[in-house]
Image: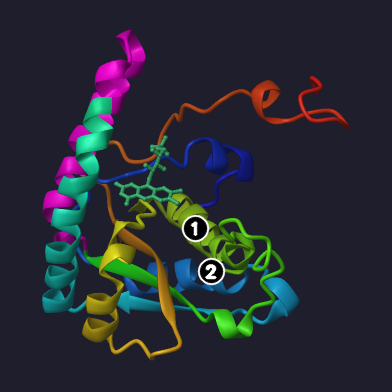
Amino acid sequence: MSVDIYEAMSTLRAVRRLRQEPLPEDVLGRILQAAAWAPSGGNVQPWRVVVVRDAEKRRRLGDLYRPQWVKYRVGAVEGAARLEGDARAKQQRMLEAADQLGERMGEAPVILVFCFNPSRMAITDIDLGRPTVVGGGSVYPAVQNVMLACRAEGVGCTLTTLLCYEERAVKSLLDIPEDWYTCGFIPIGYPQLGGHGPISRRPVEKLAYADTWGAPF
Ligand SMILES: Cc1cc2nc3c(=O)[nH]c(=O)nc-3n(C[C@H](O)[C@H](O)[C@H](O)COP(=O)(O)O)c2cc1C
């Protein structure tokens, strides 16, 4: 179960085809412990996670996700059509897997619903007149820890966010209090196929600069 951290990060791809088999309690416990280890602003940990295993609630989440995926996929299909060769084939494979998740998210044995409470966060970019992201920095490290732990456990996972469009319905389904909001939905389960594996990302040279924006690192 132990996996080198660099190996884990470089093979943590989205695994959308999941078996329905339940996850053992100890595996789930370690995955949630990884979330709890994540840093947050002021160490406040302004996030909670609802571990949805109840079949009816998962089914409802899946039913809410499906139309959102169908809407989103229109743009994704158009984007794939603009690509060529390998990139296009890769995107099409991703779309097929995402279609399956869109159809069957509710069949994942566990759906982790990450919630946050903005009143407990110091959101230092809130007054800048642009979209704010700092608050997410107190939640998504926990999300990433969950996914790395899934990788270590051989459990498939994908961070999804489309259900934020259905936040009101999700809050009502899971009895989430008024002042807590949703920001991540991670269906997890053992993979149907190969699971985690190689990923494709921009090279560091395209992402990191030396001292000045645009200067090659
Ligand atoms: C913030 C965020 C939101 C995402 N939302 C969705 C989603 O709603 N549905 C989905 O199928 N994948 C979602 N993904 C997964 C990405 O599509 C995936 O990480 C990306 O395409 C890279 O795929 P790979 O890790 O398999 O290489 C999301 C990922 C992130 C980081």
Residue placed under numbered mark 2 in the picture: 35
Callout 2 touching callout 1 (CB < 8 Å): yes
At x 20%, y 37%, the residue is 74
> Is 97 in the magenta?
yes
Using the image, determine if residue 49 lies above or below residue 76: below
| Neighbourhood count class around disc 2 (C-alpha, 10 Å): few under 14, some 14–19, many 20 upward | many
Secondary structure of the residue carrying numbered label 2: helix
Instruction: Name the spot of residue 110 as percent of width and height, x first.
Output: 27, 67
Q: Say left or right for 49 vs 173.
A: right
Instruction: Name the spot of residue 57 as percent of width and height, x first.
Output: 17, 77
Residue placed under numbered mark 1 in the picture: 149
Q: Say left or right for 184 vs 145.
A: left
Q: Say left or right for 90 vs 149.
A: left
Range drawn in magenta: 79-108
State which tag comes first along the sequence, 2 or 1: 2
Give the quarter the ligand 1 occupies.
top left
Q: CA distance from mark 2 to mark 1?
A: 9 Å
Considering depth in this image, is 99 or 82 the residue closer to the camera? Answer: 82
